[in-house]
Amino acid sequence: MAFRFRTKYLLSFAIGAIAVIVDLLFFRSTPFFMPLLGIAVIVSISEMASDYYAENKRQKEIEDKFPEFVRNLAGTIKSGMPVSRAIIQVAKTNYGALTKHVRKLANQVEWAIPIHKALSNFSKSTNNGVIKRAVATVIEAEMSGGNIEDVLQTVTESVMKIKNIKEKRKASIHGQIVQSYIIFVVFLGVMLVIQNLLIPYIVKMGENSASYDNPLLSGAGNADAIKNLTEETDIDFRSPNLFFASLGKWMTSLQGIFLMLGMIQGLFAGMVMGKLAEGEIRSGLKHSIILVTMAFLVITLGQGFF
């Protein structure tokens, strides 16, 4: 599916930019600074993400309605009606998101455009891989003089089998997707405990042990290394040079490492979910966005409040 930038996306970008400015001015020294920064980014891309998944939903509806259209077309041809008249006849039926494409096909046939050309235009307008493959088979049969009724019947059976396989796979994997979300939530909880409770406790014990001349933890170098584990690093916005220098230091600090770890885990876990459920990595982007957002908000809020 090709992505097209639309003017309306500028509004969400503007709202996100305003949110970032407000966050910098009023929440920089509060625990809400990083979470609000993440929310601003989400707002900026929300319109694009909404359109992307709306188009995905439309494509799935088109794919679901296509077997019904082909079945009706094959039945009409079987009754003795020519292919061109059959297309015009079945175009009167409502096929949901596929309706406008079918009616466009019927209009082209009425305008005396060759059947194979009209069908080719139909498959291109739907921009659906399954329909493109099916229509290519029908076109080959029509141009070679084959029995188009039998071809349509075979195409219908093939598309229905593909649809049933996808539905069975999605149903069988649903429980695993729920388990993956639960596991990820537990993973975030464990990370919060390790970063904000366990590591500070170990550091405190190390400092106490160092003060008693513990042979394993004694020495100024070891004591300084232990303190650096929990040292907070703030991002400096006073100039571009200071910003990038402080950002690099923050990303290599304990705060940045835990945040990147959680977000990377969420990104790839979501892609795996999409691949298992629908056979496409891009289908997992919605899971990735949800998990990455969860990781960012939970970890940054935990870092801010603890």
Image: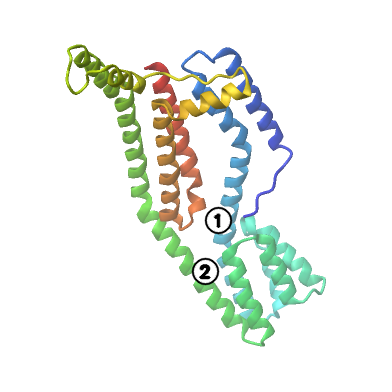
Q: Nearer the viewer, residue 266 or 164?
A: 266
Q: Nearer the viewer, residue 134 or 14?
A: 14
Q: Position of residue 92 (x, y in %)?
A: 69, 64
Query: Residue 149 occupies which quadrant of the picture?
Result: bottom right
Residue type at the position of mark 2: Val
Q: Is residue 20 above or below residue 124?
A: above
- Residue 80 showing in the rendered view: no
Task: Tell me the SS state at disc 2.
Answer: helix
Q: Quadrant of residue 265?
A: top left
Marks 2 and 1: CB-CB under 8 Å?
no
Where residue 34 sits: x, y (%)?
50, 23
Check the image and report above or below for 30 versus 241. Answer: above
Task: Residue 126: give x, y in percent of width and height.
Answer: 66, 60
Residue 118, percent from left and from top: 74, 71
Nearest the viewer among 274 and 265 is 265
Circle number at residue 91: none
Counting residues from the N terminus, which is met first, the one under dot 2 or under dot 1? 1
Q: Which residue is denoted by mark 2 in the rendering?
A: 159
In-image side of 191 versus 114 (left or right): left
The furthest residue to the right = 111
Q: Is residue 62 visible?
A: yes
| Helix, strand or loop for disc 1 | helix
Q: Is residue 162 left or right of residue 76?
A: left
Residue indicated by mark 1 = 60
Lateral position of residue 252 relative to residue 225, left or right: right
Q: Image point 50% across, 46% down: which residue?
A: 285
- Give the alpha-carbon distance from disc 2 to disc 1, as whole Å: 13 Å
Of the pair 29 and 273, the residue shown nearer to us: 29
Residue positioned 49% across, 68% down in the render: 160
Where is the C terminus found, in terms of image quarters? top left
Image position of 19 (left or right of 291): right
Please state which amino acid type lies under the numbered disc 1: Lys
